[in-house]
Amino acid sequence: MSTDWTKCAAPSADDIADLAEQARDTLPAAFAAAAREVLIRVEDFAPEDMLADLGIDDPFSLSGLYDGIPMPHKSVMDQPDRADTIWLFRRALLDEWIERDGITLLELVTHVYIHELAHHLGWSDDDIASIDRWWE
């Protein structure tokens, strides 16, 4: 039986947000409270100013980003101008999902979400890489 692709649509931003919420719901208790304090925002691509700030030319190369003050650096003296946010970029995620044959979209979104949450917890890319071999 073949699929009628004329009735199919690519996962929406809301679908990606739902997958990230599923990932958040499965976190161990030690991380769940901190995770609930961070907004999840899904856009098709990173905004141009964000890409420029990061020195990134290709919007497909950024699938997620943590934007905020990491927990170990927070102070009662901080005057944040926006909420801590984990950004997920739908088009970059979908392209990566296609390239990484054999994984589900839930697995990819979960991985990116947890990677960005680790930055909120104060982990560096090197810290994350020492326990997460996903990108090899």
Image: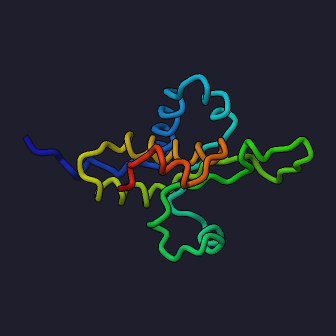
Q: Is residue 135 above or below residue 109?
A: below
Q: How is the image coloured?
A: rainbow
Task: Give the percent coordinates (x, y) of residue 94.
Answer: 37, 55
Quarter occupied by residue 56: bottom right
Residue at the spot 54% in from the left edge and 25% down from the top edge: 28
Residue at the spot 59% in from the left edge and 22% down from the top edge: 29
Quarter occupied by residue 109: top left
Residue at the spot 45% in from the left edge and 38% down from the top edge: 19
Task: Pick out the residue farthest to the top.
Answer: 29
Task: Give the percent coordinates (x, y) of residue 46.
Answer: 56, 63
Q: Going by the image, does 44 lie left or right of 100? A: right
Q: Going by the image, does 118 lie left or right of 76? A: left
Q: How many marks?
A: 0
Q: Going by the image, does 125 lie left or right of 39? A: left
Viewer-closest of 104 and 130: 130
Q: Is residue 18 above or below residue 101?
A: above
On-image quarter of the C terminus = bottom left
Residue at the spot 58% in from the left edge and 44% down from the top edge: 118
On-image quarter of the N terminus = top left
Viewer-closest of 44 and 88: 88
